[in-house]
Image (spheres, rainbow, N blue to C red):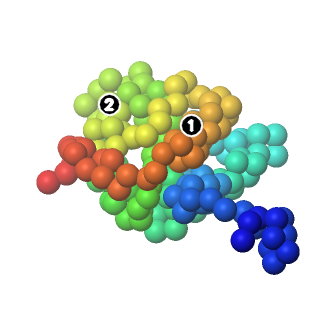
Amino acid sequence: MGLDSPTFGNEVITTKLDEAVNWARESSLWPMVFGTACCAIEFMSVASSKYDISRFGAEVVRFSPRQSDLMIVAGTITYKQAPILKQIYDQMSEPKWVISMGACASSGGFYDNYTTMQGIDEIIPVDVYVAGCPPRPEALLDALLSIQQELRSKAYDPNRHKNFKGLLDV
């Protein structure tokens, strides 16, 4: 039977299962924000009506790691907070992605001291870095679009972070 058959008409769409799953994943990312500083305020503006993160399918902000698949780390992370961040990341179910938002989360920012972590990639794998202090809301939306583009273009690899060894990994 073809797609124009009398049984189905023009109501059937055929695709590959991987493409359908990737489309569903890219269109329904559920972020969890680990906000500790001014970058968290910029995330709040992304959720406002002017920037409207819901246009990109990521409006369901969760505050439980078990219900989210996108972690946005926004702000300064100290070594005392590192085990908490790592535990929250580990509680997220696969597949999961991480955005490091702002100079402090990405590289420690201007806090070059013994208490501030010089980038969250010391403890968890990061998929996209967002530059700025604080970054503009458009930059965070661009990071979200880049994760969606990755989801659209390739099949999910559950072993993509398998070789990552952070400071807290045993």
Q: Nearer the viewer, residue 98 or 81?
A: 98
x, y percentage for residue 64?
50, 66
Query: In the figure, 107 relative to 52: above or below?
Result: above
Q: Residue at x 52, y 68 (%)?
A: 67
**Does residue 1 appear in the picture of this structure?**
yes
Along the horizontal axis of the image, is 69 left or right of 123?
right
In this view, the residue farthest toward the bottom is 7
Q: Which of the labelled discs sits on residue 163, or is there none?
A: none
Task: Check disc 1 and give the amino acid type.
Answer: Ser
Neighbourhood count class around disc 2 (C-alpha, 10 Å): few under 14, some 14–19, many 20 upward? many
Reply above or below: 112 against 90. above
Label 1, on which residue? 146
Mark 1 and mark 2 lie on one chain; the one further toward the N terminus is 2
SS at circle 2? loop
- Crowd class of label 1 (few under 14; some 14 to 19; many from 20; radius 10 Å): some
Image coordinates of residue 109 in percent, x first then y, are 42, 25
| Total numbered badges shown on the rendered structure | 2
Q: Label 2 is placed on what type of residue?
A: Gln
Q: Residue at x 52, y 31 (%)?
A: 130
Residue at figure coordinates x 58%, y 40% from the top left: 149
Describe residue 73's horizontal placement relative to residue 113 as left or right.
Answer: right
**Residue 9, quarter of picture:** bottom right
- Residue 60: quadrant of the picture: bottom right
Q: Quadrant of the C terminus?
A: bottom left
Q: Is residue 69 above or below residue 99?
A: below
Residue at horizontal 51%, vertical 53%? Answer: 70
The residue carrying mark 2 is 118
Determine the residue located farthest toward the front in the rendered image. 1
For mark 1, give the secondary structure.
helix
Q: Nearer the viewer, residue 9 or 48?
A: 9
Q: How much space separates mark 1 and mark 2, taking CA atoms?
A: 24 Å
